[in-house]
Image (cartoon, rainbow, N blue to C red):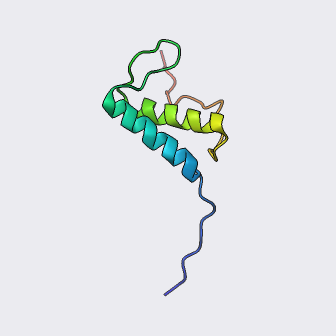
Amino acid sequence: MAARKKTGKRKYGKAASKRVESAMRRRKKGTLKSGRSGRTVKSRKQAIAIGLSEARKKGAKVPRKRTGRKSGGRKRSR
């Protein structure tokens, strides 16, 4: 059997996963609020994003946000 090769470092730190976990719990409880509007968050994806954002602010190990991502829409022909 061939030995498994490590494919790099852990992308997110433990502190980041704790923040996301906390955000998920708050979402389930109904106390997680979004930024400016202060609306209650119901979306799982939004809860994860908020958790990662909080982790970034606290200085946890979180990869940088992707920027300049192209949309996958196809060109329309007339």
Q: Position of residue 34 (x, y in %)?
A: 47, 21
Count of picture labels: 0
Whether residue 35 sits left or right of residue 57 in the image: it is left
* Vertical comparison of 27 with 77: above or below: below
* Vertical comparison of 32 with 15: above or below: above
Q: Position of residue 33 (x, y in %)?
A: 44, 22
Is residue 65 visible in the rendered structure shown here? Answer: no
Give me the residue at 41% from left, 26% from top: 32
Whether residue 18 sits left or right of residue 26 in the image: it is right
Residue farthest to the top, as pictured: 37
Give me the residue at 55% from left, 45% from top: 16
Would you identify the image quadrant in which residue 67 lies? Answer: top right
Residue farthest to the left, as pictured: 29
Is residue 8 visible in the rendered structure shown here? Answer: yes
Q: Position of residue 20 (x, y in %)?
A: 48, 41
Give me the residue at 55% from left, 37% from top: 52
* Vertical comparison of 3 with 7: above or below: below
Most foreground residue, 35 or 29: 29
Residue farthest to the bottom, as pictured: 1
Q: Position of residue 9 (x, y in %)?
A: 63, 60
Most foreground residue, 20 or 11: 20
